[in-house]
Amino acid sequence: SRRPPSPASGWDKSALATHRVLLLDQRGTGRSTPVTAKQLLALPGGPQAQAGYLEHFRADSIVRDCEVVREALCGGKKLSLLGQSFGGFCILTYLSLFPDAIERALFTFGLAPVGRTADEVYAATYKRMEERNRRFYQRYPQDVELVRSLVAGLHAAPAPLPRGGTLTARRFLQLGLLLGSASGFEALHDLLELARPPSADGLPDATSSLPDLFLLEVEAAQQHFETNPIYWLLHEAIYCDGGGGGGGGGG
């Protein structure tokens, strides 16, 4: 969990006026035994051992961690929970396992699609992202050719990133995740503008190197995946619902 600002502002300020606020680093992140690529690669036993280790970082384990905290720090008093994104998924698990421990539950963009399969979630998400893309290029039509030029150039010659790693066309296109946030249109457009060379048409070509500032901003936009690889490893599984496998598998 992020650390609160000082002085408090936003919802922190409102909550602190009437509540004691506890911010949890969910296991596998922050200061709670963070999962890293280096750590996983060092596990003896290969992929099977890695998968077995990651089973300890699911929502059911996170909720049981919260119960230990509730008993130790809150004397067993009921909690009011605020869940953002995956935090909302964890609240649903909390309500299933320990409903009597919760006074109220608040969800902010984190209500799991109960009763829907992962395939259905993907289909609905694709339609929403298709619409977000349409609106983005309607607002910034000058970015259409720029993105096409960047993708073509990265297909021909992936670019080394300043901190290591490689910017491929596929990795570049993952910047579309920005379109899911409230200020994502402006953030993505501003980032793309950094890739424009001072040429007549303002489009990069396969023979030109991308500006360092653009590459640094790409890294900054994706750095949470570098520091929290557990997102990539477990994100898809949280949308599984039920006891079956495949698109409707449990996890």
Image (cartoon, rainbow, N blue to C red):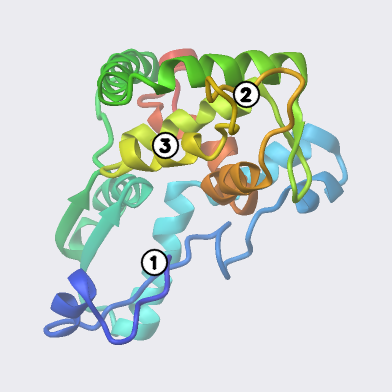
Residue picked out by circle 3: 188
Q: Amino acid at mark 3?
A: Leu
* Along the line of sight, the residue nearer the viewer: 137 or 200: 200
Task: Locate residue 199, reporting x and y percent.
Answer: 59, 27
The first of marks 2 and 1 along the sequence is 1
The first of marks 3 and 1 along the sequence is 1
The correct choice, above or below, for 22 with respect to 50 in the image is below
* Along the line of sight, the residue nearer the viewer: 216 or 59: 216
Residue at image x 42%, y 41%?
A: 190
Residue sticking out furthest to the front: 200
* Disc number placed over residue 204 in the picture, else none: 2
Question: Depth-wise, is mark 2 or mark 3 nearer the camera?
Answer: 2
For label 1, the crowd category at 10 Å Cα-Cα, with few meaning under 14, some 14 to 19 and many 20 or more, is some
Q: Amino acid at mark 2?
A: Pro
Residue at image x 42%, y 23%?
A: 143
Task: Locate residue 68, reporting x and y percent.
Answer: 42, 72
Q: Amino acid at mark 1?
A: Cys
